[in-house]
Image (cartoon, grey):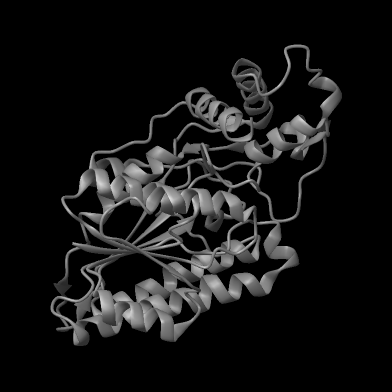
Amino acid sequence: MTILVTGAAGFIGSNLVKMIYKRYDNPVVVGIDNMNDYYDVRLKEERLAQLSSYPNFTFVRGNIADKELIDSIFAEYKPQVVVNLAAQAGVRYSITNPGAYIEANLIGFYNILEACRHSYEQYEGGVEHLVYASSSSVYGSNKKVPYSTDDKVDNPVSLYAATKKSNELMAHAYSKLYNIPSTGLRFFTVYGPAGRPDMAYFGFTNKLVKGEKIQIFNYGNCKRDFTYVDDIVEGVIRVMQKAPVKQVGEDGLPIPPYAVYNIGNSNPENLLEFVTILQEELLAAGVLPADYDFEAHKELVPMQPGDVPVTFADTSALERDFGFKPSTSLREGLRAFARWYKEYYG
């Protein structure tokens, strides 16, 4: 089995590669990442260093928006499964740097789809399954909760969300036209050790360590479906192994072998409760001193543009089709993060 993982030095990508080597017998994994400086590149280098010890792991430093590079990777390595995690992430950054999202999330994903399409002409079997990261952001400010993949999601409130919805539409079109089995995964607020510093739990910790104030948006009246990275990766692994079935319709044309699932903890946490648990675990891990004055370092502020008041995943379809439901509690996950932070930063 040859598996291509884009965004392999990223938070989810690097954890996925590790899990592939635990679950598969002698896999060949090709990882690609452009190692950009959206956040501290040293974290990406650290993750990559851990992957370099695995047998049959090949790393390509490059951009999925580079069509020639993507085509050459498919021609040389002939992947049977493709997991596209490479993307420009972050809601707020999409307001100030929209071009990065068009390049990575639209052009880059188009290049992946085109390479999958032509794989059937280039090598036996071609791509058996394309799995790609979507996002809970596609739900926008939907009032109905929990969010179901059956819900209408045509009103994104950020460019990031719009590009992720576009990925689902593009994948559907390519599945219909070229019979490419594809599954989109809407991730809900992924967190954990060695995660992304732009995420709230990591950013809050950095600021508290420096003695700076943390801003809690919507005056703390936001709820987030925090999902531990190991649960996300377990979901991806299970989905990878079960591609949507190819079928032919009454018109003789392919019925798109296409699916979309939520992967979330299905247990939204209030931001103030989240901050309380985080500070307790930071104290327990020794990241912050026992006499730290949290109240002096907290500031309640209005909602930010592009944000939504609640995220809440309906994972019944994931449970039905794959027998899996994320279950790591927020305290367990933040404890693991706090201990990692202490070890990594000292």
Residue 151: % across, % down: 45, 55
320 to 64, vertically: above or below: above
In front: 179, or 10?
10
Residue 104: % across, % down: 54, 72
Residue 309: % across, % down: 66, 43
Who's the residue at 67% across and 37% down the image? 222
235 to 5, vertically: above or below: above
In front: 275, or 279?
279
Residue 134: % across, % down: 46, 59
Who's the residue at 57% across and 76% down the image? 103
Camera sees residue 252: yes
**Quadrant location of residue 174?**
bottom left
Compared across the picture, whether 296 is left or right of 175 comes to right
Compared across the picture, whether 14 is left or right of 145 comes to left
Q: Residue furthest right?
A: 296
In front: 154, or 56?
56
- Tell me the quarter of the image containing the N terminus: bottom left
**Quadrant location of residue 123?**
bottom left
Camera sees residue 317: no
Count of numbered labels shown in the rendering: 0
